[in-house]
Amino acid sequence: MASTQEFIATGRRKTSVARIRMTPGNGKIEINGKSFEDYFPTVPLQSTVLQPLQVVKLTNAYDLAINTTGGGAAGQAGAARLAISRALLQADGNHRATLKAEGLLSRDPRMKERKKSGQPGARKRFQFSKR
């Protein structure tokens, strides 16, 4: 294992968590045991995940093994994007300025608001009856 260098990072978005294992290779991406194109079939989700690699121009430099749990497809793609950004930062600290300028190093804090008691949802109220 000493011959190959690997970088491990975690990213979160909404309720999704992505754990990544990045090793030098030729650009193969595997998510939860499936190929990248099968797991994220739409182009916007694929471009979200690949954005950090495209920004630092290392699209085919690393093999990625990603494990995602929780949330939906968009949340998992956002979590994977943050995890890839953090792993790239471990690999080479000189990428910090480029990634930070694109906003790829900040975790999106927006979460679903909790339901309050006496209401059917977070903000919605039960119907008011005057009489």
Image (cartoon, grey):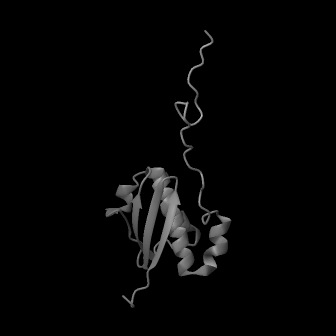
Q: Nearer the viewer, residue 9 or 78?
A: 9
> Which residue is at a point 39% across and 90% down the rendered structure image?
2
Quadrant showing the N terminus: bottom left
Residue 88, compared with residue 30, is above or below; it is below
Q: Position of residue 117 (x, y in %)?
A: 54, 35
Q: Position of residue 30 (x, y in %)?
A: 36, 66
Q: Quadrant of residue 96?
A: bottom right
Q: Position of residue 28 (x, y in %)?
A: 38, 70
Residue found at the far left of this picture: 33
Q: Nearer the viewer, residue 88 or 110?
A: 110
Residue 120, compared with residue 89, is above or below; it is above
> Which residue is at a point 57% across and 43% down the rendered structure image?
113
Q: Nearer the viewer, residue 82 or 56?
A: 82
Asked if one can make out residue 49 in the rendered structure from this viewpoint, the answer is no
Q: Quadrant of residue 122?
A: top right
Total marks drawn? 0
Going by the image, does 31 lie left or right of 89?
left
Asked if one can make out residue 125 in the rendered structure from this viewpoint, the answer is yes
Q: Quadrant of residue 23?
A: bottom left
> Which residue is at a point 57% across and 76% down the rendered structure image?
89
Quadrant showing the C terminus: top right
Q: Position of residue 53 (x, y in %)?
A: 52, 69
Q: Nearer the viewer, residue 47 or 66?
A: 66
